[in-house]
Amino acid sequence: METNNWIEKILNSTNGMTQVSPSDDLFSKIQQRINLQNRVSPKTVWLVAASILVLVMINITVLKTKTKDKTQTSTSYLESTLNQSNQLY
C-alpha cells in the first residue's frame, strides 16, 4: 500500500506545472550567435579537397611503380637462374 501511494505521489507530482515560454528576443539572440561564428570559405574547402585528391593520385602512382618493379625483379631473377651459360643454342 505504501509503495502504491509513493507511485501515485510521483505520478501526480507533475500536476499543476505550467509550460515555460521563452523570451521574445531569444530567437534573435540565437541568430546573432550563429552569425558571429567563424565560417570556412568555399575557396578553402576546394583547396583542401584538391590537395587530398593530389595526395591520393601520388600514392596510387607510387604503388603502381613499386608493383611494376617487383614483377620485373622476379622476372630478371628467373631469367638469370635459367640461362647461366649465355649460350643461345
Image (cartoon, grey):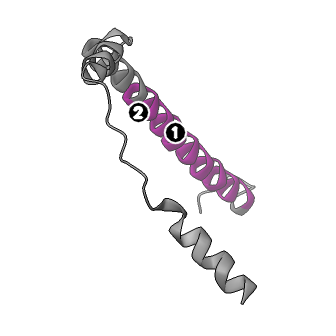
Residue bounds of the magenta highlight: 53-81
State the residue position of label 2: 57
For the view shown, which residue lies furthest in the bottom direction? 1
Element on which disc 2 rests: helix
> Was residue 62 drawn as part of the magenta stretch in this picture?
yes
Would you call the spot at circle 1 few (<14 residues within 10 Å), some (14-19), or many (20 or more)? few
Tell me residue 81's x, y (percent).
Answer: 74, 59
Q: Nearer the viewer, residue 58 or 41?
A: 41
Residue 55 circle label:
none
User: In the rendered image of this protein, does residue 67 appear above or below residue 9?
Assistant: above
Left or right: 10 as drawn, with respect to 14:
right
Amino acid on which disc 1 is placed = Thr
User: In the displayed structure, does residue 71 sit left or right of residue 53?
Assistant: right
Could you tell me if the residues under marks 2 and 1 are in contact, i.e. CB atoms within 8 Å? no
Residue at position x 59%, y 63% in the image: 89
Mark sitting earlier along the chain (2/1): 2
Residue holding disc 1: 65
Distance from label 2 to label 1 (Cα)? Answer: 12 Å
Instruction: Name the image quarter holding residue 79.
Output: bottom right
Q: Is residue 84 above or below residue 3?
A: above
